[in-house]
Amino acid sequence: MYSYRYCLNRPNCAEGFQESRNGTFFIDKSGLIELVNAKIATKEKWICVSRPRRFGKTMALEMLSAYYTKGIHSDGLFGGLKIKDSYSYYQHLNCHNVIYLNFSEYFENTSLTSGGIPAITRRIICDLNQEYPGLLEDVQELPLAFDMVQQAYGAKFIFLIDEWDSIFRFRKGKKQEQEEFLNFLKLLFKDKTYVELVYMTGILPIKKYNTGSALNMFREYTMLDPKRLSPYFGFTKEELAFAVSRSDLTIENLEEWYDGYCVEGEGHIFNPKSVSDALNEGQCRDYWNKSGGFSELEEYITMNFDGLGESVTQLLAGEEISVNVLGFSNDLDSFQDKDEVITALIHLGYLTYQNGKVRIPNRELREEFANTVKKLSWGPVSQLLIQSKNLLMATLRMDEEAVAQALESVHDDMQELKEYNNEHTLKCVIHLAYYAALDLYRLVFEPTAGKGIADCIMIPRRSDLPGIILELKYNSSVEAALKQIRERNYIAAIPQSIRKVILVGINYDKKSKRHECRMEKLLRQG
């Protein structure tokens, strides 16, 4: 007689991973299994992996469930994958009791008292009663139920938990409920001999309180510190090589749009959700930010913390900024300063972090930042982004006066940048002013080589467009700017296939606060 299973050893638990394997551009991440196998029944059996949404967390859990769950036969699913070469592969294949839970199903629309914890408890005990009939009559405490099963049958369990942090994202400000939830997990897992492994995933690391974490037995793998799980936080360039060979896209396309997340030991990784969609659709565009949840960006970058607006402006202009990530409390409702907001944006996937600094990782996210700022009517920054297309058109028709006036107007009103008269601010202004050019050009900013220099080389994406080289001077002259472009042979940075190049010299006079622009057109020989 068929009996339904809520969480324990579900007979259809391999179907999610089967669908992933059926995909045209499946990327093999089965090496994760070998690392997790080494943690089973050890003092490192508590694992918490936090990554942004749509970064492969659920796929990993589906793979682990298909591999570990007893009562099914999933060997065929792993044919040709890396894990098949591991000595531990057959040691753990389909021989564990697996409890699979997605906490968002319990906490997104219900509180702990009306649903949540009672529903989890009720369903798991129901499953245990079916697996071990007659043992748990009138038992209502989940840790007790597991302990009784272990004593009676010697059974142990692997817990696979998705969206572990749902309560902190969906029940913001409910401190009592959040603490009750953490205590529930502590009582369920800590020092319990029936636990073989706990593998939890979420967006946020484990919540910190003044007294520390109630779940301090967990080893955490985060966007700030992925440790040995680095290869499994996204797609590497090497992993994409075979997939791209069967696609109309190139690695260069994917790098511009979805690369840029920095993880220790792996360098840059690609956003897996967006790469998968781009490969399947044959087109690079903003997939990830269409999958929901991006209203939070608007909420966080408009918070009233000193310096936050300036930092967002610098990030949007392509800058890196320093951040202290240590103060973050691992929730989304108790920010104390701009550093904590920026740290949250790292965990949420909007920013990437390396060596104490953050930046916007790729074009997909830059577009989302720009669209959000435009929508906010955020003073001159918003206006600059909206008008940037006009500035590009003025540059292409070599309208020197229009270019100078546009830059002057924006520079005069750039209150988000506290330091007005320096080359750093000029560079930010130029980058934001030409933001619309990103559709047609790749913008390359040269390192500063002396006071007042902030070069921008705009390489066209189409051969019928001219290349553009901008040289900024500070209290100098437009003639000096153009002379430097020629003498330092900046034109060599533009491919030979581009026959027309526009040289743009801009000078800012500190005393008059005026901008002057002079342009030249060069025609290369065929």
Image (cartoon, helix red, strand yellow):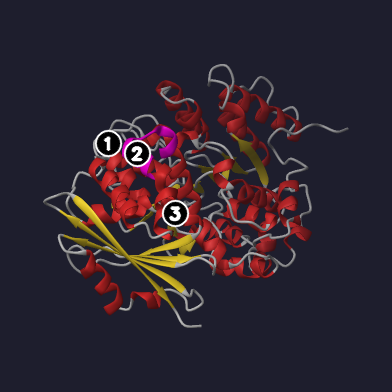
Asked which secondary structure carries label 2, the reply is helix
Residue 433 highlighted magenta (yes or no) = no
Does 347 appear above or below 108? below
Distance from Cα at disc 1 to Cα at disc 3: 40 Å
Q: Hey, what amino acid is under mark 3? A: Met
Task: Say which mark, if any, is on residue 337.
Answer: 1
Viewer-side residue, 54 vs 62: 54
Q: Are marks 2 and 1 in contact (CB under 8 Å)?
A: yes
Asked which secondary structure carries label 3, the reply is helix
Report the magenta stretch's main SS: helix
Residue 348 picture location, percent across and down: 46, 43
Residue behind mark 2: 341
Residue 361 picture location, percent across and down: 44, 55
Q: Which of marks 1 and 3 is in front?
A: 3
Quarter-of-image position of residue 399 = bottom left
Determine crowd level at label 2: few under 14, some 14-19, many 20+ residues with C-alpha closer than 10 A. many
Residue 221 visible in rendering: no
Q: Give the range drawn in magenta.
A: 373-384
Q: Quadrant of the N terminus?
A: top right
Residue 383 highlighted magenta (yes or no) = yes
Question: Going 14% across and 53% down the picture, which residue do you hit?
Answer: 510
Residue 317 picture location, percent across and down: 35, 51
Q: Residue most toward the bottom?
A: 526
Q: Are marks 1 and 3 in contact (CB under 8 Å)?
A: no
Distance from Cα at disc 2 to Cα at disc 3: 36 Å
Q: Hey, what amino acid is under mark 2? A: Val
Specify which label sits upstream in the sequence, 2 or 3.
2
Asked which secondary structure carries label 1, the reply is loop
The answer to whether residue 274 is left or right of residue 132 is left
Count every numbered label the image shows and give the total. Answer: 3
Q: Nearer the viewer, mark 2 or mark 3?
A: 3
Residue behind mark 3: 393
